[in-house]
């Protein structure tokens, strides 16, 4: 129960650390496809994305097109 609460809260935190944890859980295949979809969708609602967040997403091997759609003004920092 606590594990699911923790996972549900990760995208709402909106920090580089939370993005890093999400990336690690996705890379280690510890989350469902549904959770991945929810997490990726939630990235668009982070109000002040940082360069470090962008780097975390890039390390996750997400398609550059996905990142550019989510953060069109931030792509120049990659």
Image (cartoon, grey):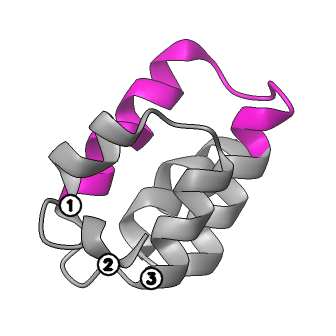
Q: Is residue 8 left or right of residue 47?
A: right
Determine which residue is flagged by label 3.
51
Q: Which residues are magenta?
A: 25-44
Disc number placed over residue 62 in the picture, else none: none
Q: Residue at x 60, y 49 (%)?
A: 7
Q: CA distance from mark 1 to mark 3?
A: 11 Å
The answer to whether marks 1 and 3 mark residues whose Cβ atoms lie closer than 8 Å is: no
Disc number placed over residue 49 in the picture, else none: 2
- Element under label 3? helix
Q: How many marks?
A: 3
Determine which residue is flagged by label 1.
71
**Is residue 62 visible to the viewer in this orientation of the structure?**
yes
What secondary structure predominates along the stretch shown in magenta?
helix
Q: Is residue 11 left or right of residue 58?
A: left
Q: Residue at x 61, y 63 (%)?
A: 56
**Is residue 2 visible to the viewer in this orientation of the structure?**
no
- Element under label 2? loop
Q: Position of residue 69 (x, y in %)?
A: 17, 44
| Along the line of sight, the residue nearer the viewer: 43 or 52 | 52
First in sequence, mark 1 or 2: give its number: 2
| Residue 39 within the magenta-colored segment of the rendering | yes
Picture quadrant where residue 43 is located: bottom left
Q: CA distance from mark 1 to mark 2?
A: 8 Å
């Amino acid at each position: 129960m606590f594990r699911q609460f923790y996972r549900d809260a990760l995208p709402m935190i909106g920090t580089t650390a939370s993005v890093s944890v999400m990336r690690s859980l996705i890379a280690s295949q510890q989350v469902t496809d549904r959770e991945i979809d929810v997490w990726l969708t939630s990235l668009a609602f982070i109000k002040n994305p940082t360069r470090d967040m962008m780097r975390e997403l890039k390390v996750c091997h997400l398609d550059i097109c996905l990142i550019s759609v989510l953060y069109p003004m931030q792509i120049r920092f990659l």
